[in-house]
Image: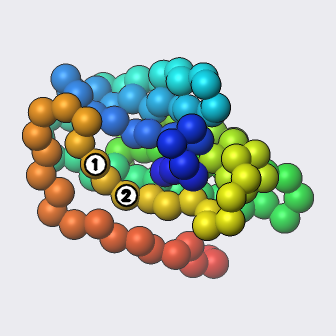
């Protein structure tokens, strides 16, 4: 999930683990790492908004506990400036990967 080159959160998979990396300005830090089951995984990004205060961005693997939950202000126009807002997508930084689909599901009120 990214705002721009200097403001983004990444959920990565390598060597049987999922990791979350935050990039805020000049700082890049791996914040969390969890083991994932062998075979295909379904990454999940859940953005929860709040009436008062920042939104929360949770990264997980479908069916598992969150890998990390982060403050949504940092990759936003509030901190990074700009006007287009956040974007979400998939990319490969090393090796190969196969993406079967990408699906955006808006939250539903229960």
Q: Residue at x 15, y 62 (%)?
A: 100
The residue lying furthest to the right in this view is: 52
Image coordinates for residue 5, horizontal then vertical, percent: 51, 42
Q: As drawn, is 72 to the left or to the right of 2? A: right
Element under disc 2: loop
2 up-or-down from 24: above or below: below
Image coordinates for residue 6, horizontal then vertical, percent: 57, 38
Element under disc 1: loop
Looking at the image, which is closer to me, 37 or 89?
89
Q: Residue at x 35, y 45 (%)?
A: 61
Looking at the image, which is closer to me, 34 or 94?
94
Residue under numbered circle 1? 91
Residue 39 visible in the current orientation: yes
Q: Do the numbered discs 1 and 2 sit on residues whose CB atoms are within 8 Å? A: yes
Q: Quadrant of residue 110?
A: bottom right
Residue 66 visible in the current orientation: no
Q: Residues within 10 Å of mark 1 (few under 14, many from 20)?
A: few
Q: Residues within 10 Å of mark 2 (few under 14, many from 20)?
A: few
Image coordinates for residue 27, horizontal then vertical, percent: 60, 23
Residue under numbered circle 2? 89
Q: Residue at x 70, y 47 (%)?
A: 80
């Amino acid at each position: 999930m990214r705002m721009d080159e200097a403001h983004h959160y990444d959920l990565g998979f390598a060597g049987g683990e999922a990791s979350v990396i935050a990039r805020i300005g000049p700082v890049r830090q791996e914040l969390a790492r969890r083991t994932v089951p062998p075979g295909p995984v379904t990454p999940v990004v859940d953005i929860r908004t709040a009436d008062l205060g920042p939104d929360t961005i949770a990264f997980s693997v479908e069916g598992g506990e969150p890998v990390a939950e982060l403050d949504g202000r940092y990759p936003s126009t509030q901190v990074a400036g700009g006007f287009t807002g956040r974007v979400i997508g998939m990319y490969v930084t090393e090796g190969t990967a196969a993406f079967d689909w990408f699906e955006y599901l808006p939250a539903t009120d229960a």
